[in-house]
Image (cartoon, coloured by chain):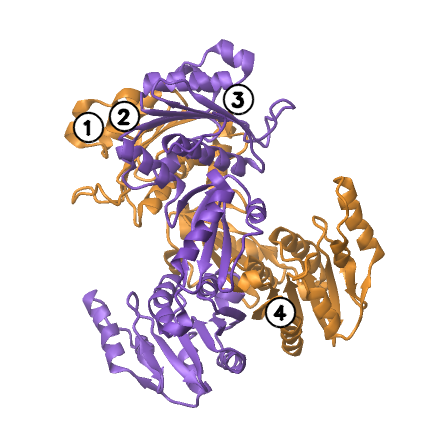
Chain colours: A orange, B purple
Amino acid sequence: MLLFEIVTIGNELLSGDVLDTNASLVGTWVTRLGHRVHRRQTVPDDIPAITDALTLAVNRSHWIVVSGGLGPTDDDMTAEAAAKLVDEPLVCDQRSLKRIMDRFAQRGLPFPENNVKQAMFPRSATIIDNPIGTAPAFEMRIRNRRLFFLPGVHREFRTILEQHLVGALTSEERGTCLFETMRLFGSTESSIGQMLQNICLNSGELIQYRVKFPEVLVTPVVQNGDSARLEVLVNDIATRVGALFYSTGESTMPEVTGQLLRAKKWTIAVAESCTGGMLGELLTSVPGSSDYVTAGVIAYSNKAKQDLLGVSNATLAAHGAVSEPTVTEMLRGLRRTSPADVSVAISGVAGPGGGTDEKPVGTVFIGVQIADNPPTILHKQFPGNREWVRILAAWTAMDQVRKILSDTKPENV
Amino acid sequence: MLLFEIVTIGNELLSGDVLDTNASLVGTWVTRLGHRVHRRQTVPDDIPAITDALTLAVNRSHWIVVSGGLGPTDDDMTAEAAAKLVDEPLVCDQRSLKRIMDRFAQRGLPFPENNVKQAMFPRSATIIDNPIGTAPAFEMRIRNRRLFFLPGVHREFRTILEQHLVGALTSEERGTCLFETMRLFGSTESSIGQMLQNICLNSGELIQYRVKFPEVLVTPVVQNGDSARLEVLVNDIATRVGALFYSTGESTMPEVTGQLLRAKKWTIAVAESCTGGMLGELLTSVPGSSDYVTAGVIAYSNKAKQDLLGVSNATLAAHGAVSEPTVTEMLRGLRRTSPADVSVAISGVAGPGGGTDEKPVGTVFIGVQIADNPPTILHKQFPGNREWVRILAAWTAMDQVRKILSDTKPENV
């Protein structure tokens, strides 16, 4: 196992203006590959501070990933500090210089003299191509330690990390790390952690958790390339979490719902009260969603529920806007004005006001109807503040559509 | 000026599972108060690693803020490491123990023996109250350096930082720091930076920037308590950025728009195509927005534009769904089905598909109409991907309503 250290450079990280997302990305990759990040340092744009940090890192870590301070301005001094560390001059790399000058020429811009700096490297450095920007990247070796200097801009940092640095590990160091990210919706990280706590893990196997509210991402990792073991873990997790598990990889809930609709060539229309348009916004966040999303009605006031959806005064008076009868009538009205294969209606108390003993904040009714089959109405009690209740309501509606369309047993049916 | 160092403790920070938001919060506060965070270290839950980091910090920094490792489980070892650093035993603080036991008793839960640990402190430590959790906090002094140990849970960390740590500065150290956060919408951080670059700042004055897409937050800070100077800076910035400046403090665009509607006792209704419900979602994100948001129509397909809003086939055929005539007819239809004091309609090409030479991706028409006055139609060309275009479209619509209602000169009028 290799010990990694991350050194991030920049006054803006220390002053709190910018979150250190590069460091967290390195951590995720290194852990997944079976190695360990055991230290992180952040230092200002200052040569002695940078050389001190690098000296410390070289004394205790095998691989050192350095981020930032490689731009063209005066406060970018990482390359100079790296040269000082090994007592070398900075030399100009003609190929890098040409690439940078070409970039300016292509855009018809004059070449600012300052930018020559971005082609200057410590003499013994090995230059790493930056496929998406002008900031340089390079590697140095000091006493068998490998130091990687990457630009701080997150998109460039990420690209070089994933394309170059992971590849710089020997096949032995890299092992054959296999993993699969499983997306779960409908429970909390701690509950899911309990469901999975006594899964048997062999050495070199782990489960990573990441909360991306309202989802929890669970990633089983197998470091010895045993794909059969990965499958065992995925299946074991899937069995334990049941219907919480809704997709893998980068497929989000709006995409999964959309794929199911597209596969059946079905359309969807929505009627929203407490979510105020969020369900429509989520469904249409997917490129090409115009193939299946037809229309929506935001019936926020009672008057809009009556005027736009024909909910009756009597129903609103007898049961209130947040009730199964109102949601049933919202579905009926929606089917009349915007007929679609799938109709969804949501009404709830998002808070902070409006709660009662009978219907506290977080009470939400969600109706889903396929064609003119009898609708399914969920009665939910969501935790959290207004934002949470609305997000959980819109996601639960999509999840219910997903369950019905994929023949997963939907809730309450 | 005091030099601050931040030491964050936890395997989960190094493995990338959790973003280090505590460190960034300290940076914002310390910078604002006129001091400087000059180093940050992150170490694993490991006693030698923690004591090494603290030793280094004590040798080079005046104040050290330590976060994490104060929970009840075996991998929480910050208090033990702190005791080792000064060669003291851990002693049980009876008052803290009682508070923790009371918390469990109040909830009718048995007291887990493990939690005694959270009442154990290095002998010379001064205990700091944690008003919102059971994790302890304490201060130690080593050779005139002040070390603050705070729980890692962000909400608890933030509360103790803001209530206790800022107050622990002497009035001289704290100075009288005044600041005002100005919220700007409608331009980029770099353009705004250029508008403000030659503002004259005296010593002890600074301007902090933070991007919170699609907004840019600009915070002028005056460290000597000169409120007249702060006013001068706020006015200078306001003059330079003009109508980009829409509010101060925590008032977001949906809130500002809502306040203006509420003040006039006006209602608002929306008709959305490319934003798919996002404008409705944003307007209704504000508690109490049912006082002014009445209804919305998500007319995503052309058929929905015809059926729900009465947009004519001829107009769609002649000008397309993304056009001034279509948006004008969307407003007319919205006023018919959902009459409100303010009507808003949006239609655009969010991409990635659907762009043409004449109407490339990012083309958006935004119509705002007050009662039955002639509508204002903006024709915008937004940069970025689908998500950006949709967010910019929904925000620009709110901003246009804000400008019209506040008698700021609206765009294109």
Work out whether mark 2 precedes mark 4 in sequence or the reverse, and give the earlier one. Answer: 4
Q: Compute the Cα span from label 3 to label 2.
A: 28 Å
Q: Which mark is residue A316?
A: 1
Judge whether B100 appears above or below B201 on screen.
below
- Residue at the image position 22 percent from the left and 29 percent from the top: A325
Q: Compute the Cα span from label 1 to label 3.
A: 37 Å
Q: Position of residue A314 (x, y in %)?
A: 16, 24
The residue labelled by disc 2 is A305
Q: Do marks 2 and 4 share a chain?
A: yes
Judge whether A378 appears above or below B218 on screen.
above
Q: Which mark is residue B178?
A: none
Callout 1: helix, strand or loop?
Answer: helix
Discs 1/3, front: 3
- Residue at the image position 48 percent from the left and 40 percent from the top: B242
At label 3, the amino acid type is Val
**The image quarter in which residue B122 lies:** bottom left
Q: Are marks 2 and 1 in contact (CB under 8 Å)?
A: yes
Discs 2/4, front: 2
At label 2, the amino acid type is Lys
Q: Position of residue A85 (x, y in %)?
A: 72, 74
Q: Quadrant of the C terminus of chain A?
A: top left
The residue labelled by disc 3 is B322
The subunit carrying tag 2 is A
Nearest the viewer among A106 and B150 is: A106
Nearest the viewer among A304 and A247 is: A304
The residue labelled by disc 4 is A4
Discs 3/2, front: 3
Q: Compute the Cα span from label 2 to label 4.
A: 59 Å
Q: Do marks 4 and 1 share a chain?
A: yes
